[in-house]
C-alpha cells in the first residue's frame, strides 16, 4: 500500500513538473513572438533601409574569408541541395601551375550591428539573441571579384571583358 501511495505521489510530482515546463515553454514562445513583432514591425524596420542611427553614421562591418578547400578533383558531377534549390556542379581539375590559376571553395563571414534590431531583454523574457530569416533583414551589398581575366569597371558594375 505504501508503495502505491509513493508511486501516486511521484506521478503527481512528475505531472506538476511537466505542467511547469510546458508553461515555461509557452511563455518563452510568447516572448519570442512578441519580440519578433516588436523588432520586425514594418513601421520601425525595413530591410531596404541602412541600419544607422543618423545619416552621418556608417555601418561598421567586419569580413572574414575562410578557405574550405582547394578544388582539385577529377571530372565528376555533384549535386547540392540547399534551401529548396538543386544545383548541379561539374568539377574538373582546377589547379594549373602553367596558367597560375587555382579554384577554391570559400566561406565569407560578415558581421555588423543593425541599429534597429535592438531590444531590452528584460521586456522579452530575458531573450538576448534571436535567429531570423536573412531575407527579412538588411544585408550589405558585397561583391568579391578575383578573376584570372582582366576586369573593366563600367559605372558601378564590374564586367569581364
Image (cartoon, rainbow, N blue to C red):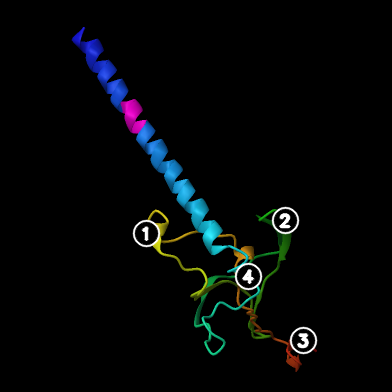
- Mark 3 or mark 4: whose residue is earlier in sequence: 4
Viewer-nearest of labels 3 and 1?
Answer: 1
Q: Residue 114, position in %: x, y?
A: 51, 73
Q: For residue 122, which numbered disc appears in the image?
A: 1
* Of 161 and 11, the residue lying toward us: 11
Tell me the SS state at disc 1.
Answer: helix
**Horizontal relation, residue 29 to residue 78: left or right:** left
Q: Mark 4 points at which residue?
A: 46
Q: Mark 2 points at which residue?
A: 86
Q: Name the residue under label 3.
A: 159
For marks 3 and 1, give the CA distance. Answer: 50 Å
Q: Residue 126, position in %: x, y?
A: 37, 57
Above or below, comparing residue 22 to residue 93 in the picture: above
Q: How crowded is mark 4: few (under 14 residues within 10 Å), some or many (20 or more)?
A: some
- Farthest residue, direction right: 161
Q: Residue 139, position in %: x, y?
A: 60, 73
Over which residues does the magenta segment extend? 14-18
In which quadrant of the rendered view does residue 6 lie? top left
Above or below, comparing residue 152 to residue 87 in the picture: below
Give the residue at x 53% y 60%: 38
- Mark 3 or mark 1: whose residue is earlier in sequence: 1
Viewer-nearest of labels 3 and 4?
Answer: 4
Residue 108 in magenta? no
Residue 17 in magenta? yes
Q: Residues within 10 Å of mark 3 (few under 14, many from 20)?
A: few
Q: Contact (CB < 8 A) between labels 2 and 4?
A: no
For marks 2 and 4, give the CA distance. Answer: 30 Å
Q: Main secondary structure of the magenta part?
A: helix
For marks 2 and 3, give the CA distance. Answer: 27 Å
Q: Contact (CB < 8 A) between labels 3 and 4?
A: no
Amino acid at each position: 500500500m505504501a508503495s502505491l501511495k509513493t508511486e501516486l505521489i511521484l506521478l503527481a510530482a512528475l505531472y506538476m513538473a511537466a505542467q511547469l515546463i510546458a508553461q515555461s515553454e509557452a511563455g518563452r514562445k510568447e516572448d519570442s513572438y512578441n519580440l519578433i513583432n516588436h523588432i520586425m514591425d514594418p513601421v520601425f524596420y525595413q530591410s531596404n533601409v541602412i541600419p544607422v542611427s543618423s545619416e552621418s553614421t556608417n555601418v561598421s562591418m567586419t569580413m572574414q574569408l575562410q578557405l574550405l578547400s582547394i578544388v582539385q578533383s577529377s571530372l565528376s558531377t555533384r549535386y547540392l541541395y540547399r534551401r529548396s534549390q538543386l544545383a548541379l556542379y561539374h568539377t574538373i581539375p582546377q589547379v594549373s601551375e602553367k596558367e597560375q590559376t587555382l579554384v577554391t571553395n570559400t566561406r565569407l563571414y560578415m558581421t555588423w550591428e543593425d541599429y534597429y534590431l535592438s531590444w531590452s531583454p528584460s521586456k522579452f523574457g530575458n531573450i538576448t539573441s534571436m535567429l531570423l530569416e536573412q531575407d527579412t533583414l538588411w544585408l550589405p551589398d558585397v561583391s568579391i571579384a578575383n578573376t584570372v581575366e582582366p576586369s573593366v569597371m563600367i559605372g558601378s558594375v564590374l564586367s569581364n571583358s
